Image: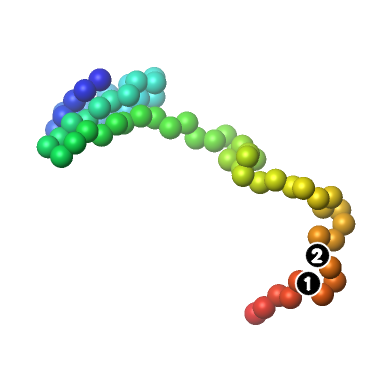
Amino acid sequence: MVTNVRTFLRDFTTFKARARKGETVRVQDKEGEFLFTAATPRKSLLAAAKGRITCHEDLTKPTLPSGAWKPSL
């Protein structure tokens, strides 16, 4: 759906509902065009970290040698 900024702001709830249903709203102004779509939030912290955290070692054993970790205050 294509609209202008004034109509988009006036009927924002209508366009938000359309975006939730999967439609893409194109908002045109003098400088260009903007796309308004709905993003689905992740359901859990584990789902948000999926593909970003990898464990390659057995974490039941120490991961660093004895003197390798030196905290600083």
Left or right: residue 27 versus residue 66 is left
Q: What numbered label is drawn on residue 68?
A: 1
Q: In this view, does 57 lie above or below 67?
A: above
Image quadrant containing the C terminus: bottom right
Image location of residue 11, percent across then percent down? 21, 27
Type of amino acid at the residue the image marks with label 2: Leu
- Tell me what residue is drawn at x 81 percent, y 50 percent: 57
Residue at image point 25% right, 27% down: 26
- Disc 2 versus disc 1: distance between alpha carbons? 6 Å
Picture coordinates of residue 37, whole percent (x, y): 35, 29
User: Which residue is depicted at the point 85% across and 71% down?
Assistant: 66
Residue 1 in the image, given as x and y percentages of width and height:
25, 20
Amino acid, disc 1 = Ala
- Helix, strand or loop at mark 2: loop
On the image, numbered disc 2 is attached to which residue?
Answer: 64
Horizontal relation, residue 66 to residue 37: left or right: right
Left/right placement of residue 49 relative to residue 13 reads right
Q: Quadrant of residue 67?
A: bottom right
